[in-house]
Image (spheres, rainbow, N blue to C red):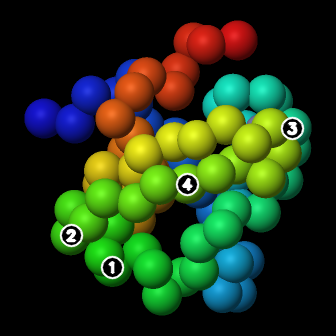
Amino acid sequence: MIPFLNTWPYELIQQDVYFHDCPLCGKSQVLLPLRRKDLPDLISGVKRLLVLPCCLNKLTIVGADRDYLLANQPLRNLR
Ligand SMILES: [Zn+2]
């Protein structure tokens, strides 16, 4: 069971992966240092450290599905 609090939706625009807004600082349209081709690894559970370009906070991504990234920490209700 995936903890919903640890999820955050992403968006794909061609090969790029975006957050509509950053869970940590609230900036909109954040281009993530990920590519579409990286998603299958994330979905299969390969861990990946993500440095958010907007606020330089680090997130450890531990999973994903077609709509959400899963972090090892809560991402919701932080602001
Ligand atoms: Zn941010």
Q: Are marks 2 and 3 in contact (CB under 8 Å)?
A: no
Q: Disc 2 and disc 1: Cα gap in Å?
A: 6 Å
Q: Secondary structure at mark 1?
A: helix
Mark closest to the chain's N terminus, 1 or 4: 1
User: Mark 1 touching mark 3, by CB under 8 A?
Assistant: no
Q: Which residue is mark 4?
A: 50
Marks 1 and 3 sit apart, C-alpha to C-alpha, by 26 Å
The amino acid on which the numbered mark 2 sits, given as a three-letter code, is Ser
Q: Is residue 27 visible?
A: yes
Q: First in sequence: mark 2 or mark 3?
A: 3
Point out which mark residue 27 bears: 3
At label 4, counting other C-alpha atoms closer than 10 Å, the crowd grade (few under 14, some 14-19, many 20 or more) is some
Q: Amino acid at mark 4?
A: Leu
Q: Name the spot of residue 63 as percent of width and height, x first.
A: 30, 54
In the image, residue 23 sits, relative to residue 62, either above or below, namely above
Q: Tell me the CA gap for discs 1 and 4.
A: 16 Å
Vertical placement of residue 68 versus 76, above or below: below
**Where does residue 6 sit, x and y in percent of width and height?**
39, 30
User: Helix, strand or loop at disc 2?
Assistant: loop
Closer to the chain start, of discs 4 and 3, is 3
Circles 2 and 1: CB distance less than 8 Å?
yes
Q: Which residue is mark 1?
A: 40
Classify mark 4: helix, strand or loop.
strand
